[in-house]
Image: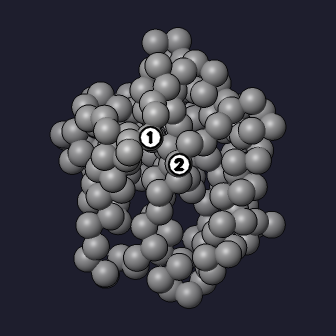
Amino acid sequence: MPGLLSEKGLVILDRDGVINHDSAEFVKTADEWFPLDGSIDAIARLSAAGFTVAVASNQSGLARGLITDEALSAMHRKLCTMVAAAGGRIDRISICPHGPDDDCACRKPKPGMLVELGEHYGAPLAGVPVIGDSLRDLQAAASAGALPILVRTGNGTKTELELPPELSTIAVFDNLAAAATVLAAS
């Protein structure tokens, strides 16, 4: 049975670098997981505006043995608890647990996680905002037929400078809060 969508439909967020601070050494525990300024309230605003909020995140730290399933679950509980306290809701979190060389269908830039979310909700991905900070997030969104949106947090400033021609006209925002403001008003 498909999940229920809110009135404005689905919005999909990358996690590291969009919602929380990223780390080259990987965020390995809930104690190391810190939201970016304004990101929790931004998710709450998206929820209040009528969006169903989902997260799609590569988590190769699992395959590398740097993160345990329990630690990842604790990070996601922390995220969901903070969003709920702000009056919002994350409806679903999809992760790719594979490493970069595993050639899976779910690891961004492949669209597998996004396609799975679309199937879960029984909704086409055309026009669904997918907000990320890395080229692979944007490529996955474009490949799935969704609407790629770049934020300058995390890897976003670097990504913006390296956008390929086919992605050069996408919307770019300073952070998730700025993107949420525009989406919530639409």
Rendered location of residue 122, percent (x, y): 31, 38
Q: Residue at x 60, y 27 (%)?
A: 47
The answer to whether any part of residue 155 appears in the image is: no
Rendered location of residue 110, percent (x, y): 27, 59
In the depicted structure, whether residue 171 falls above or below residue 184: below
Q: Earlier in the sequence, mark 2 or mark 1?
A: 1
In this view, the mark in front (2 or 1): 1
Read off the residue under disc 2.
92
Binning the other alpha carbons within 10 Å of mark 2 as few (below 14), some (14 to 19) or many (20 upward) gives some
Q: Residue furthest front?
A: 1
Tag 2's secondary structure?
strand
Name the image quarter holding the N terminus: top left
Rendered location of residue 59, percent (x, y): 50, 69
Read off the residue under disc 1.
3
Give the amino acid at mark 2. Arg
Binning the other alpha carbons within 10 Å of mark 1 as few (below 14), some (14 to 19) or many (20 upward) gives some
